[in-house]
Amino acid sequence: MDLTTRLHLLNLIRLSASAESTCRAAERAERRARLRRKEAAAARRRCRSAVRTARSRDLEVAVKALDEAESEYEARTGQVEAAVLRWRRAFAASERADARLGRELARTRKLTGAWQPRRKGARLSAEISLLSELAAMPMELVRAASALLVQSSAGKDSVVALDRVVRWAKAAGCLDKVVVVHADIGEEAEWPGVRDLAQQQAERYGLRFVVVKASVGFLGMVEKRGMWPDAQNRLCTSTLKRDEAAKLFTQIVDELGLDDQALIVNCLGIRAAESPSRRRKHELTIDHRASNGRRLVLTWHPVFHLSETEIWQEIADQALDYHPVYDTLIPRLSCIFCILASFEVLVRAVRLCWVLGLPTPRTYLDLEQRIGHRFKDQFSLAQVVEEASRREAEEGPLTWRRGDAIRHHLGEDAAAAYLHRLALAPESERRPLITHTLPNGCRHRGVGHHEHA
Ligand code: SF4
């Protein structure tokens, strides 16, 4: 089966899923409308009985209330009829979409037996199998895409994902389709130099670089809600990153100006090994929420099957620049204080802030106090800062050397070779990311570069 047919089937799957969810929503709306009519009927019964038993001086008021209840009941009945009509239309559309998908699947995949899209998981398994076939042919996927967006946090997984996509796009002769997107979640929440590094990583390949930013940053969002997000409610990711990136899809499709549906491949550097919830994801999926008649959006995880060591190996092999925060053995370039980070990592982050003279621990502590909600269920930021102070008193300030991340994961020789390769890279790829003068006169060029002034 060729790629065009696979994409055509995926779009039919999307249409079928979308028609089914419209049908379910219409069914729910109909149930709600019936419930409201039932309540209106009960109110009307009460008013009728009040009219029957009213004394003459109360009769006028009771009759007026009954008139209103009758009108309310009629309006609710009208709403039920309209809701039933909408549900019937949605059901018929869903049946048609399923039948079309069934016919096309039977024709192209030579299915035997009756297609039963409503059988639990039937459509999903067709979707998964088509997508895993597509994921196994990255060059064709890159060639077929109208645009390739790489969501870059500037972190280690993003930079390897970007490098892989660029290599495939170069080989396919379509590097101009690649756009690097960075979600800015607020200067006060991120490590210094993150945005610059994301831009620098894009510029290394001569790619277009776009920054998306919500009107309210991470701290503003927490202040407004009076709560920190958590693993179950990752509003920070959905509101500050996903929703903002989705707005860009519309802009990109407008720019493309295609007559046909555009294929947007949205690349994210997430890996199965990162967490049990990520392990349940797939390498390639349809973004049902972001897709519509004008665009089919596929979410692609080009480094999905890589381990952490393999990520560092690719960084070393390709001489990719990474953020110096990794050299302090903080494992992820996330927000300075990520709601998903462990106690140990947060303690390290506080100590790094102190070395860099960042006000972040104080800012977060104040916010935690103000909203009266603990940073995480298991512990507060105040406890993290307390532990960081204890370690600082015991061990002194954090120290590190450039290349420590590679040293830690791949050994001394790999780190030496990596630093040598970086030193040979053009000056534009080596500019210092952060320059901080510390109170004790110790100057850091790049987070991990100690120079005594
Ligand atoms: S890095 Fe952590 S805190 Fe920051 S947006 Fe992502 S999940 Fe939320």
Image: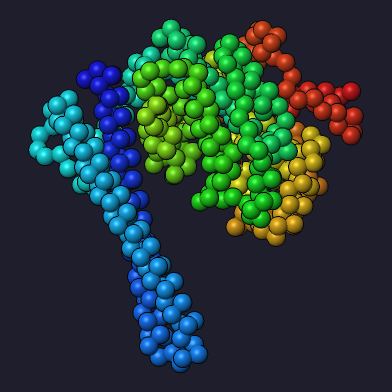
Residue name at image x 25 percent, y 41 percent: 93
**Residue 375 on image: x %, y %:** 65, 53
Q: Nearer the viewer, residue 156 or 120?
A: 120
| Residue drawn at the location 61% of the way across and 30% of the way down | 212
* Residue at 35% from the left image edge and 58% from the top image edge: 79
Q: Is residue 63 among the parts visible in the rendering?
A: yes
Q: Quadrant of the N terminus?
A: top left
**Ligand 1, what quadrant?**
top right
Q: 283 or 215, which lies in front?
A: 215
| Image height of 290 relative to 342, above or below | above
Q: Position of residue 225 (x, y in %)?
A: 64, 53
Q: Is residue 89 above or below residue 260?
A: below
106 with respect to 377 (left or right): left
Coloring scheme of the render?
rainbow
Q: Is residue 416 left or right of residue 253?
A: right
Left or right for 354, reference 130:
right
Examine the rendering and report whether any part of residue 403 can be seen: no
